[in-house]
Amino acid sequence: MSMIALAVSSLRHRKSTFVATFLSLFLGGTIVMAFAAMFDTGTADGVDSTTSEALVTMASVVGGWGLIIVAFAVVSTLTMSVRQRSSEMALLKNVGATPGQVSRLIVGETLAVAFAAALLAVAPAALTGKILLEILQETGQAGEQVGYVFGPVALSVGFAVTVLGAATAATVAARRTSRMRARDAVAAAALEQSGMSRKRKIAAWVFIALGVDLGVVTATVFNGEGVDAMQTAGQASIWFAIGLALLSPALLRMVTNVVGALLSRLGAGGWMATQNMRQRVHQMGGALMPIILFTGIATGTLYMQSIENAAAPVANTVTTAEEAQTIETLNLVVVGMIALFAAVMVINTLVSATTYRRQEFGQQRLAGSTPQQVLRMVGAEGAVLASAGVLFGSIASIATVIPYSIARTDSVLPDVTVLLYVGIVSAAALLTLASSLGAARKTISTPAVEAVAV
């Protein structure tokens, strides 16, 4: 009971610490419940078979992918939050807290935040689901007479994913921290000495291999099969992007080693950015994850649909205009949902990570750094994150774009506009730089002495 009381007290006095976790859970719960409501609506009494099939497909396909992305984002956010609190966990161990007590503290805080997020997500999820049904009705994929139902499936799935998923993620994220000895925890809090776990590396390469396999199947088995190739092509970039996102600390370290010499020539700000990225690869890797997902999935899905729109009909397949419209709507909804969620996660993660560095910025200013040098440091870090995220996200998208182009046009390079890619890259860069610099400007507005005392 003492750790539960401590968890409640921690939430009460450190609300800003849990904002990032709350927002990811809130938005994730909203998305999952909104698409789960399509199942409630499609299986209600009096719904015609065509509408029912379209709505259930929407709930299963889009909602399923949304569930995977949301779960991944929640785990990464919670992991970053736990890493940021390493010094606090070390202090608790030094005063006698057991590993079990530390784990219960983290899980208890997460459960409280998750339940609040799920509860507050019900209203916006119901509204989002209603808007989604209206879009489907306007495009002729759902009957005009179908009434919207936000029922037990939406609520049960939403709360199960948000609350139970968050508790599981918190348990996983807290396990390593709680098992470390107090002395090691203090050292880990001062400097990021740990590498990625073996399980994480294995999971990453399994996802990458799955993405490659689906790409090969698309280009070979589904070659000449028309729109059916989307069954495997669409998944390829998603799995590949998740695999690369899991490897984000290692990828960021590699990029930093390559561009570090160049950054160091840009003055004190560039030199400090290089040192920070080398010492904080796990925290900054958490910020890199959503950039990779945003770029990879948005590029892969949008270019796949562009290739399909430009491809000639396949003689041996029968795809009606309604089916083609349904497929296009599904793809656009998928990329819209994931892009929106990933964009919010980019902002959320970067703002949280930058705000957390208030004390660090204060120490740098007391040591002689000017506010402009601190901002240049953050800007350089943001530029590296954006470049790395775009680079590896683009690599992930290849698993969808090239195989689908081969399957539909017998050409390795698709004959589609490059402006689409420019728009995605620009959006990723703008989100990254605006979020990090905006949060840094607000953070350094606090006097240095007060910042260090926090």
Image (cartoon, rainbow, N blue to C red):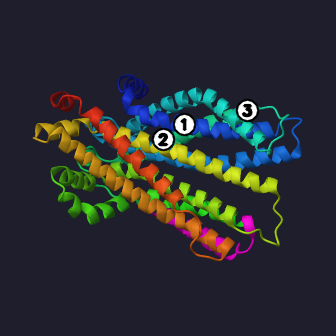
Magenta segment's dominant SS is helix
Say which label, 1 or 2, has the lower sequence index: 1
Residue on which the image places disc 2:
344
The answer for how far apart the CA atoms under marks 1 and 2 are is 9 Å
- Towards the viewer: 36 or 436: 436
Instruction: Report how many numbered discs are placed on residues in the image.
Output: 3
Residue type at tag 2 = Val
Residue identifier under label 1? 27
Residue at (56% x, 39% y) in the render: 28
Residues marked 3 and 2 touching at CB (< 8 Å): no
Side of 172 where 279 appears, left or right: left
Going by the numbered disc 1, the residue's amino acid type is Leu
Image marks 1 and 2: residues in contact by CB distance under 8 Å: yes
Task: For marks 3 and 2, give the CA distance.
Answer: 28 Å
Nearer the N terminus, badge 3 or badge 2?
3
Q: Which residue is mark 3?
A: 152
